[in-house]
Image: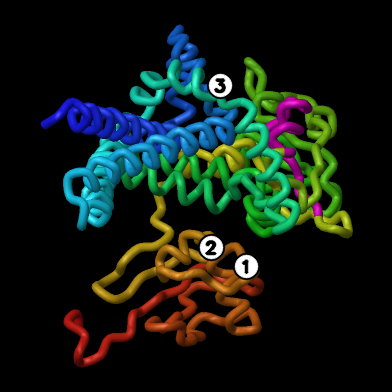
């Protein structure tokens, strides 16, 4: 083996290593986590900050990597062809193509990219000095490529939206949860936070029919009994009816160190806060903080009272149901036997969809409203209808709403549970 052959083989090996480095670098910068790099930079890792700076100019970086990778691959193919043609005059070109293809595929692409995916941040920081040098010397080339990219964008109208939608963020959270990096509670909190901004006051309010309120003419003795019975710390005060809320009575204002206050409700009540039913709950949270209140009356488009929202209602949209020592732990969906379930009319739409394992085509936000919508009227106890594999029967109802339903799963002779 002469010196020219040895030199050619050495050059091919070095170029193959360069090709592997470029391929691994491309994968590392594509897969790395900016959040992890920012954390490292904040902890004083200077190389992490330099790597972040490269990521910010990703188009130039990618152009430099592709130019470098193509140059070394073409050079490697040329040297290989010359080498094999000198050794095998009749089949040198074919053998060279086969050998270089296998070498580049295995050692220049698959292996380095697989390794880079395992620890992209570490690899990216290791090659950052080399990449900065490459980007710098290829600045004129990158400038021409950037102009060419802009031309292509204009010709083909490539103005893709790079922002991530709420649904995409929710899917990302689910993927992270499935990978085990966060637990179920953390996943639920993140998804609730994403959905938080899009909800209106009417989505979380306590409806008018469930409000506990007092007339401004109610005696203090009766108010004391109502506070004791309902366990609420605040009561809306109305004049004539619930459409005319005139104040909010705080329990801490009603009681003094010696017992029930001797002052009338009119003098004890505070000015109420009114919000429209279309107000977003994140805006409501801002109003609660600004007005230093924990309760607001929700009104419809005509100014009538739809219900009320408390600070607890808003927080529950983030962290889930909050129970205190006065709350009864009532199951809103409970199994009475193997195929039969009792469902509270207050069960929200999300929980009902989870129970049926499908999206419901309804404008209602509760199980009771959904039943009324399905039947086209306010049903009586005993009324029923079929929904998928379930027979839905009203078990409790008042004159204007459904309080409880029974969902009985239909079974057949082939059903193993029958």
For label 3, count other residues whose C-alpha is less than 10 Å away and answer few (under 14), some (14-19) or many (20+). Answer: few
Instruction: Give residue 408's quadrant in the image.
Output: bottom left
Q: Which mark is residue 245?
A: none
Whether residue 43 can be seen here? no
Residue 380 vs 38, above or below: the answer is below
Span of residues in magenta: 283-299
Q: In the rendered structure, which disc, 2 or 1, sits on the residue that comes first in sequence?
A: 2
Q: Which residue is mark 1?
A: 364
Q: Is residue 71 left or right of residue 107?
A: right
Residue 211 rendering spot, x and y as whole percentages? 67, 51
Residue marked by disc 3: 137
Local packing at callout 2 (Cα closer than 10 Å; few below 14, some 14-19, many 20+) is many
Q: CA distance from mark 2 to mark 3?
A: 60 Å
Where disc 3 sits, the SS reads helix
Residue with the mark numbered 2 = 349
Q: Quadrant of the C terminus?
A: bottom left
Earlier-in-chain disc, 2 versus 3? 3
Q: CA distance from mark 2 to mark 1?
A: 7 Å
Comparing 321 with 150, the one in front is 150
Residue at point 38% right, 37% down? 75
């Amino acid at each position: 083996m002469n010196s020219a052959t040895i030199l050619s083989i050495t050059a091919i090996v070095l170029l193959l290593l360069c090709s592997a480095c470029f391929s691994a670098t491309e994968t590392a910068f594509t897969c790395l986590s900016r959040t992890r790099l920012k954390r490292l930079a904040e902890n004083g890792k200077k190389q992490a900050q330099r790597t972040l700076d490269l990521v910010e100019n990703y188009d130039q970086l990618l152009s430099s990597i592709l130019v470098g990778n193509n140059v070394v691959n073409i050079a490697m193919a040329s040297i290989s062809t010359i080498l094999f043609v000198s050794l095998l005059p009749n089949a040198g070109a074919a053998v060279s193509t086969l050998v270089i293809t296998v070498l580049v595929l295995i050692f220049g692409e698959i292996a380095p990219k697989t390794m880079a995916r395992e620890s992209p941040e570490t690899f990216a920081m290791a090659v950052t000095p080399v990449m900065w040098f490459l980007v710098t010397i290829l600045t004129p080339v990158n400038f021409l490529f950037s102009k060419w990219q802009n031309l292509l964008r204009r010709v083909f109208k490539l103005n893709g939206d790079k922002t991530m939608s709420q649904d995409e963020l929710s899917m990302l959270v689910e993927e992270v949860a499935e990978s085990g990096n966060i637990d179920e509670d953390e996943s639920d909190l993140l998804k609730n936070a994403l959905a938080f901004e899009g909800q209106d006051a009417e989505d979380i309010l306590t409806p008018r029919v469930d409000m506990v309120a007092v007339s401004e003419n109610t005696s203090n003795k009766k108010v004391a009994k109502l506070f004791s019975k309902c366990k609420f710390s605040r009561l809306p005060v109305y004049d004539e009816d619930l459409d005319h809320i005139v104040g909010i009575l705080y329990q801490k204002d009603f009681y003094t160190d010696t017992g029930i206050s001797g002052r009338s409700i009119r003098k004890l009540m505070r000015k109420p806060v009114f919000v429209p039913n279309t107000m977003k709950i994140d805006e409501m949270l801002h109003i609660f903080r600004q007005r230093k209140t924990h309760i607001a009356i929700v009104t419809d488009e005509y100014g009538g009272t739809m219900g009320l929202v408390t600070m607890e209602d808003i927080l529950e949209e983030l962290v889930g149901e909050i129970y205190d020592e006065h709350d009864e732990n009532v199951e809103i969906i409970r199994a009475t036997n193997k195929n039969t379930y009792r469902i509270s009319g207050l069960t929200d739409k999300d929980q009902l969809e989870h129970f049926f394992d499908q999206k419901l085509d309804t404008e209602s936000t509760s199980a009771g409203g959904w039943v009324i919508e399905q039947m086209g009227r306010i049903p009586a106890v005993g009324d029923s209808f079929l929904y998928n594999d379930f027979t839905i029967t009203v078990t409790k109802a008042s004159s204007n709403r459904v309080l409880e339903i029974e969902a009985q799963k239909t079974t057949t002779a082939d059903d193993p549970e029958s």
